[in-house]
Image (cartoon, coloured by chain):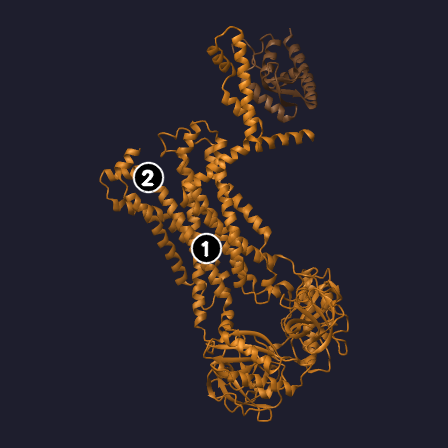
Amino acid sequence: MIRWIGNLRFRLRALLDRRRMERDMADEIEFHLEMEERKYRAGGVGAEEAHRLARVRFGGEERFKEQSRRSWGVSWLQDMGGDIRFAARQLRRRPAFTTLAVLTLALGIGGTVALFSVVDGLMLRPMPVRDEAGLRVFWMDYDWRGVEFDFARDRVKAFTSLAAYSMDAVTLRTATGSSLVLSCIGSAELFDVLGVKPLLGRTFRSGEDRPGADPVIVLSYGLWQQRFAGDPTVIGRTVGVDGRSTTVVGVMPRGFYFPTPEARAWVPLDLDPSTQTYQSNGWLVLVGRIRPGVTGAQVHDDVTALAHAMGQRWSYPAAWDKSRSPHVTPLREYVLGSVRPALLLLLGAVALVLLMACANVAALILTRTTDRTGEMSMRTALGASRTRLARQILTESVMLGAGAGALGMGLAAALFHVLVASLPLQNGFADTLSLDWTALTGAMGLAVVTGSLISLAPMRSLLAGDLSGSALGERRQSGARRGPGRLRTSLVVAEVLLAVVLTTGAALLVRSVERLRDVDPGLDPKGVLTVDLLLPEASTDSVERDQLLHSVLQRARAIPGVSAAGLINRVPARGGGWQATVAVADRPDLADRQRPNAYYRPVTPGTFAALGAHIVRGRGILPSDRLDSRRVAVVNEAFARRFWGTRNPVGRTITDNGFTEGPIEVVGVVHDIAVDKLVGERPPAVYYPWAQTMHGSSYGILVAKTETDPAALAATVRKLVTQVDPRMTVGRVETMDDVLDAAMAEPLRLRFFLGLFSVLGLVMGTVGVYGVVSFGVQRRRAELGVRLALGARPARLVGETVAAGLVPVLLGVVGGVGLSWMASSFLARFLFGVAPTDLVSFGAAAGVLIVAGVLAALVPALRAGGTDPAVVLRSE
Amino acid sequence: MSKNQPDMIRGTLDMLILKVLSLEPMHGWGIGERIQQVSADALQVNQGSLYPSLHRLTRQGWIRSEWRTTENNRRARYYVLTRAGERQLGLETDHWTRLSVAVGRILALG
């Protein structure tokens, strides 16, 4: 131990106090020579001869000094320093090579890490619940009634527990003010099913979801920090939730979320069998925990039995028959279902890019090493050991890798933010994601390992001794070079192949987005602003609420520049909301269980005008359609087409049992406005007069059309709402353009990333082709020179060289088209209006790669054609 | 070095240095002279190669060095045997003795 420390101290001194060590050594040797000289002098030798003899007997002074230095045990460090300096010099001497290698590798690494962080956060990291594998969501989400939940809870045998929840925005009033908080409304069992314990206080107690219970609220960690400054005495405090005084009973631990990170508080459901909501509103999600040891088949039998029992208990209309196709979905799949395929697609694309980057750098390094055979041979001849040379190549590759890794980290950090901002992550997941530092460190390692592995290829031939004799004459005939040459050509074929796959995918998405843009949203988004309005239900009565919403609407219409304004219950293309079964009077075949579903859309006068939706037949909703006047409705074209075909719907009668009683006269048909989403077939929808259906509503969405910038209108509307009543809360504010963009977010974003990747792939493929052709040209310089000297036409040489360079390109294109064809079914789900085997996209990708290949081959080929035979022959 | 002089067996130089230093602290030149004298010129120490050995032994902690003044009032680096060096010398001497006895027996074979 002590010896080891002494050893280390010595080495440290050798390293740090090197100058003194050197001086001491010089002094010591000088003393030795002096003593030796003195000895000879004493023996009668003359001064000069003594001086000479002493030095002869000592031997090569420098050699022993070098040996001594090595015995200080720091030489490997010094050698490494030398290697690094040498490598840096070499890399600097070839800026184009270095830049290309580092950039391609950095892009591959940066992209992989950024995407991996997202995938890790969304798909690999466990959800913040106990044993998430046991949690299942029941079919028909947001469609279970309270009465069905109670029915199901007592019947499922394969589940230890079952809970119901939904999402709702509540107004939270604390000492610091009032705001809208998106919350999860859950049954008392919710936290038991999830198996999570609170950080402070408690969660729901049984019975708290039943009538008569004292209102309680459980806060998320984030909300607790933000609204209560993390005060631990918050438990037991009274706050206002939707105007009712409510006790804070618990705070959940940091990182917990359910069902999505967007929900920032949890309040119990009110399962009161005497209410309409309990009996007939389907708005709950059922989540259950599978009993340990129960098999999938047993779960299936259990839910099938439940569905059967429900079918006997209630008669369901066909459109939402819960007794049909019962199934359960794993919680994670349910929560993240929509993001997963897109992520996998991008991860696949980025893996292709990384592969290409590695292939490219490998090809670059191979070219470099082959170019340097002469230099290497020379150095071997001068006494450099093979291991030393190999170490130098390794150092160079590792330095490339390290440089690329560092740059890749920066890129990863930048890309990550772009990625998070542009993925379809509407549920607040973006906030839970963070750049994975392990992945970042891993990227560094990956880069270095890639660098080293790549450098192994040339090293093998180096160590095998292929360098002998090539220093002087036979540079061009050396068999060592044909191997790497073929290896590099295969690398380029692979690169082109991958580039074709990426470009085809990008082309397909570009065309999809074009088709999407052609989709008619049925409205004119220009200048349209949507504002979610919420009223406190507990502290206002229904007449007051009607007045408040009405006065906001009146004042909004008076804002300068606003040409029309109205209310609606849902923003077009932003989710479906309530549906109701309707009965069509003159279609007795659609009675009872066959009654169709239609989306329920109450609107005020002015809503259609604000949305720019025109009335196709009859009239729209008028101010004269009041609560006490005749029941009327406007249907959309899809509704009219489906139930009356070409016949005129105006004047016909429908009934809507879900929301209103009695016959309703259809007074008009409105052009198909996007309902639940932008794409796909328009579902039937019925637009009712707000006044007849939404009496006492505590929410509404204001739609206003302005001649000016709708985003600028937002501030005015907010101020106006506060002026009308400070108890009123403004929720989400979005321009219609944003809403439509969000509706096609996924294809837009995929197009963005795949486009980016395919450009990268294209660049790398081009670089690869360029490398191979220019290498070939260089190898054949002598031949070209001789042929030119013998009168060959330069144009012919150029053509020949380009043709040779195109061989790997064509091979790659054929392979790439084949691979894309095979992978097309996977891409199908991301496409819209374009076949996954769309010939235009395939042709475009192949064409782009071939053109790029020709250009890449042309540059070195032109150089070949311009070879000056005199120069070449002289240099041989 | 003339042909009939045996080469220093690898590793023995270290042992000889340790042995010389076990008698008294000595500078590099003195160590070389001493080995040559005592071996009656049978062992020729390649003078230069002494120094890498000395440096290696120092790093291993078997000897340490200090600058002293010689009797001629000249500054010189003296090497001193350490405790660890004494132990090492003991080990190497044992080893050498066993080896030379064994080699001697084989050479003495009929």
Which quadrant: the C terminus of chain A?
Answer: top left
Residue A21, position as x, y percentages in the image: 57, 27
Of the numbered discs 1 and 2, the one sitting upstream in the chain is 2
Question: Are dots 1 and 2 on a single chain?
Answer: yes
**Residue at which label 1 appears:** A819
Q: Quadrant of residue A161?
A: bottom right
The percent position of residue A200, horizontal first and vertical second, equals: 74, 64
> How many labels, in total?
2
Q: Nearer the viewer, residue B66 or A833?
A: B66
Residue at the far front: name it: B73
Which chain has been coloured orange in this picture? A
Residue density around tag 1, few if under 14, some if 14–19, many if 20 or more, within 10 Å:
some
Considering depth in this image, is A330 or A355 the residue closer to the camera? A355
> The disc numbered 1 marks a residue on which chain?
A
Looking at the rendered structure, the kind of residue marked 1 is Leu
Asked which quadrant contains residue A178, the reply is bottom right
Local packing at callout 2 (Cα closer than 10 Å; few below 14, some 14-19, many 20+) is some
**Chain identifier for the brown-coloured part of the image:** B
Nearer the observer: mark 1 or 2; the answer is 2
Q: Secondary structure at mark 1?
A: helix
Residue on which disc 2 sits = A780
- Residue reaching furthest bottom? A629
Task: Measuring from the top left, give residue A723's x and y in whole percent.
Answer: 59, 81
Q: Would you say residue B106 is visible in this rendering?
A: yes
Q: Residue at x 52, y 33 (%)?
A: A79
> How many angstroms separate mark 1 from mark 2 (CA)?
34 Å
